[in-house]
Image (cartoon, rainbow, N blue to C red):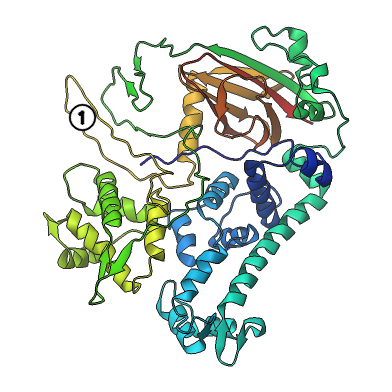
Amino acid sequence: MAISPGRDAAFSCQKSALSESLRTKKFPLTEEEIFYMNCRAAYLTVFKSSLENIISKEQLYLALQHAGRNPSQKTINKYWTPQTAKLNFDDFCVILRKEKPTSKAELLKSFKQLDVNDDGCILHTDLYKLLTKRGEKMTREEVSAVTSLADVNADGKFDYIKFCKLYVTTNEQCLKTTVEKLEVDSKLRRQQFGNHIEEPPERDPSSVPKPSPRIIRKTEQETFSKKGDTRSSSLATTRKFKTSISFTITMGANSNRNSKLTEPNSIKVFGWTGELGPGIYWLIPSTTGCRLRKEIKPVTEEAQLVYRDETGELFLTKEFRSTLSDIFEVIDLDGNGLLSLEEYNFFELRTSGEKCDEDAWAVCRDNFDTKKNELTRQGFMDLNLMEANDQEGDPRDLWVTLHSMGYNKALELTEACPFVIDIYADKCKPRIKAVHMEACSGQLEKAICKSVLNKGDARVMDGYENIIVHTYKRDTWITSVIENKSDNKVIIHINNELSKNCVNNRGLNIFAVEVAPKSTMVCQHVMPVNERQEWIYYCVYSLIS
């Protein structure tokens, strides 16, 4: 399963430049801009720079808390596996996208199951049973700390309505304080966002014509940051750039210039034909992140996963069984209708961050339907039913599994893209084996950088021979990589405002990236919004002083 790897380390130059009042009235932040501002604010509360890496579970937990999350140990283990050595800022953004803050409604729904009198309170004895026996179990001391909170406890009862309100308010205040801390330090803001803090002068958008990206003269390249008719351009007039370079690529509609690369008109199929010598080759399916994006449309009605019959016995709903069957198809990598231990462990690593060992697999084979020492589809269903029974019908752990596989609350696959790989050879019978690519490991980023450096066009920034922009174009996408050979980190400002019919994985036309010393990083992927029309990629890269 290929999950969109669009590297979301972008931050708009519109975020911090205007005063809060002017920005709110005239140029309100988009949802994406707010998200990245919150990510960076939380990260910089724990670290001095976004180039620093998270090197422990404790640091990850602390950073998530500052972002308004309250992660469980299971959530931490999902992203920090025994193989994890470090996570970077981009990885942190990916985690925050997946781990939404627990809503007040979700909390109330969980507690309400124990509210036998429907009066908004739970007996301390019932609360103790809930917190120590179900889900991620708490210790006696931890439960005692909850029942000792004066504002939400009285007469041996826990007022969960007040608690939920306090919980949500505390999380929101934590995030607000984190953002305010970043806002106060304007020097840090300029360093991290590449912004100035002066208020831009009013200007008439119609007074400056927008130049055509088809004909770019040398003088226009040199003064690009001072032209344009958008509010972002007025910000650029006061920013000091050490040097800039621009790229213009005009792409035709549905063109196909490479005879070796087969790209059918259907965007759902991609193929390659060529000669390969003896050896081992890695196939890394991925998406650019330009089109497969985080689902933001709220789900109005949550699907039911389990139900009890008149005898009280627990069953999986028809809809949930159908979804589990689809998941089974995805993780059945060899397509034999059975799950081996290796295949099942790909599923476990994705959903829980842990592997199933040989002893546990033996117990699984003894208790669930198997064939040839592999788990059948029915056995997989029964395994999930057992998990539901272990939680006394509480579906929260089941939802963790579903969200990890890309499903939303309506059981719609909105954040994952299943795929099939077919291999054909004339003179041999190739063997294919699935290998685990750890989430947030940077393996995909390294592979993309290596490919672009080998095949793309390289341009050195004027006067800075150690900073190189590599651009690799295909008929359906363009990828740029920034290489920093110097001993110091650099901040590169990227402006795509004059591109036409283009969408990038950052979700922003103007952003900046930090490139660590002696490193390369994927700057952006760009695709046409409408592949049936001509698209023009026009991008200016500027080194911020």
Residue in the foreground of this view, choosing between 426 and 223? 223
- Furthest toward the left, the residue is 372
Disc 1 marks which residue? 430
Q: Give the number of marks.
A: 1
The picture quadrant where one finds residue 418 is: top left
Report whether 161 appears left or right of 498: left
Residue found at x 19% / y 54%: 377
Disc 1 packing (10 Å; few <14; some 14–19; many ≥20): few
Q: Amino acid at mark 1?
A: Pro
Tell me where residue 168 appears, x and y as whole percent. Answer: 62, 66
Quadrant that contains the N terminus = top left
Report whether 450 appears left or right of 518: left
Above or below for 294 versus 420: below
Tell me where residue 194 appears, x and y as whole percent. Answer: 75, 37
| Residue 27 seen in the current view | yes
The picture quadrant where one finds residue 435 is: top left
- Furthest toward the bottom, the residue is 155
Quadrant that contains the C terminus = top right
As helix, strand or loop, the secondary structure at mark 1 comes to loop
| Residue 51 seen in the current view | no
Above or below for 500 versus 433: above
Report whether 97 appears left or right of 427: right
Residue found at x 72% / y 18%: 462
Above or below for 464 versus 122: above
Tell me where residue 431 appears, x and y as whole percent. Answer: 21, 34
Residue in the foreground of this view, choosing between 470 and 364? 364
Report whether 304 appears left or right of 538: left
Tell me where residue 311 appears, x and y as whole percent. Answer: 22, 77
